[in-house]
Structures are given as structure tokens and as C-alpha cells.
Image (tube, helix red, strand yellow):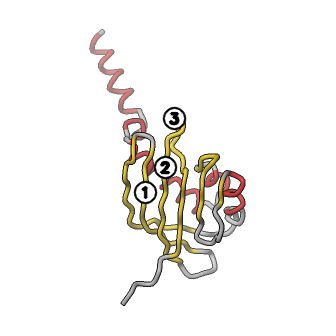
């Protein structure tokens, strides 16, 4: 009987998703990856659902602070069918606490009919209940390198 219990226990552990065993940094990294997948799928609803209801977005192409779900949805309203793609490059994660992680790095945004635009980003991913969501996202064009 003990052998059966051990076998079942090991089998259940192998079936658990990797995220179950991940820490805050790995969870936040996965949220940033899901954000990129949603952008690349041009799925505005999936993108917006990754933000907290009181989330803040300083978008690359917006002169205003987009605060809350409706403003973030408005920012991404042109995403469906756009063909936009994002490629995330270098990134670094800093665990601010068990419930907050900051991710900082670079990405390249490419419109379907345009040149790639290099940009830099900051995400603050927080834990709300059992979910990790984006509470703050700042994106800005990458300035030219100084000589």
C-alpha cells in the first residue's frame, strides 16, 4: 500500500504545472511573456485582462497616463487585426516583496506596415488573490545612443 501511495504522489508532482512551484520572479516573468503573446496575437482583451483594474499604463505612443481598465482598453483598441508584434530582448527582474516584482528591459515593437521601434519598459507585477497582474507599465521609445 505504501508503494502505491508513493507512486501516486510522485505522479501527481510530475503533473503539477511548473508555475505552481515558481517564485515571485518566475511568476512575474511568465506574466510578461503572456503579455507579449497577447500582443503578438493582436488580442486586446487578453492584453487588458493582464492588468489590475486600477492598473497604470504609460504607453509608448500615448502622451497621457492610462489609468484603469477602460483607459487601458482604449489604448489597445487598435490592436485587433493590426499585425503588431513585439519581441522582448534583455530583461531584469527585481523582487520587491512576495507580492510585487519589477521587470525592466527592452523590446522592439513592429507594426505590420512599419519599421521596428526599439523601446524600453518597466512592468510592476503584483499578486492579487491567486493571480499575478500588471499594476504599472511604462514604455518609452529608446533614445539614440550618445556619441
Label 3 secondary element: loop
Mark 3 surroundings within 10 Å by alpha-carbon count, few (fewer than 14), some (14 through 19), many (20 or more): few
Q: Nearer the viewer, residue 28 or 36?
A: 28
- Number of marks in the image? 3
- Residue 99 picture location, percent across and down: 45, 41
**Disc 2, disc 1: CB below 8 Å?**
yes
Image position of 88 with respect to 144: above or below:
above
Pointer 3 residue: 130
Q: Is residue 132 left or right of residue 14?
A: right
Q: Nearer the viewer, residue 83 or 106?
A: 106
Tell me the residue at 66%/57% (across/down). Answer: 72
Pointer 2 residue: 125
CA separation in Å, label 2 and label 3? 13 Å
Pointer 1 residue: 103
Mark 1 surroundings within 10 Å by alpha-carbon count, few (fewer than 14), some (14 through 19), many (20 or more): some
CA separation in Å, label 3 and label 1? 19 Å
Label 2 secondary element: strand
Tell me the residue at 42%/36% (across/down). Answer: 20
- Looking at the figure, which quarter contains the N terminus? top left
Amino acid at each position: 500500500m505504501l508503494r502505491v501511495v508513493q507512486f501516486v504522489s510522485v505522479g501527481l508532482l510530475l503533473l503539477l504545472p511548473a508555475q505552481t512551484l515558481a517564485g515571485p520572479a518566475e511568476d512575474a516573468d511568465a506574466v510578461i511573456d503572456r503579455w507579449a503573446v497577447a500582443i503578438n496575437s493582436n488580442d486586446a482583451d487578453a492584453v487588458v485582462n493582464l492588468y489590475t483594474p486600477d492598473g497604470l499604463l504609460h504607453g509608448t505612443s500615448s502622451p497621457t497616463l492610462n489609468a484603469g481598465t477602460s483607459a487601458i482598453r482604449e489604448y489597445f483598441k487598435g490592436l485587433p487585426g493590426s499585425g503588431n508584434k513585439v519581441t522582448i530582448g534583455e530583461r531584469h527582474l527585481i523582487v520587491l516583496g512576495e507580492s510585487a516584482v519589477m521587470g525592466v528591459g527592452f523590446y522592439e515593437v513592429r507594426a505590420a506596415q512599419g519599421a521596428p521601434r526599439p523601446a524600453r519598459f518597466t512592468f510592476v507585477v503584483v499578486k492579487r488573490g491567486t493571480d499575478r497582474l500588471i499594476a504599472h507599465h511604462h514604455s518609452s521609445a529608446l533614445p539614440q545612443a550618445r556619441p
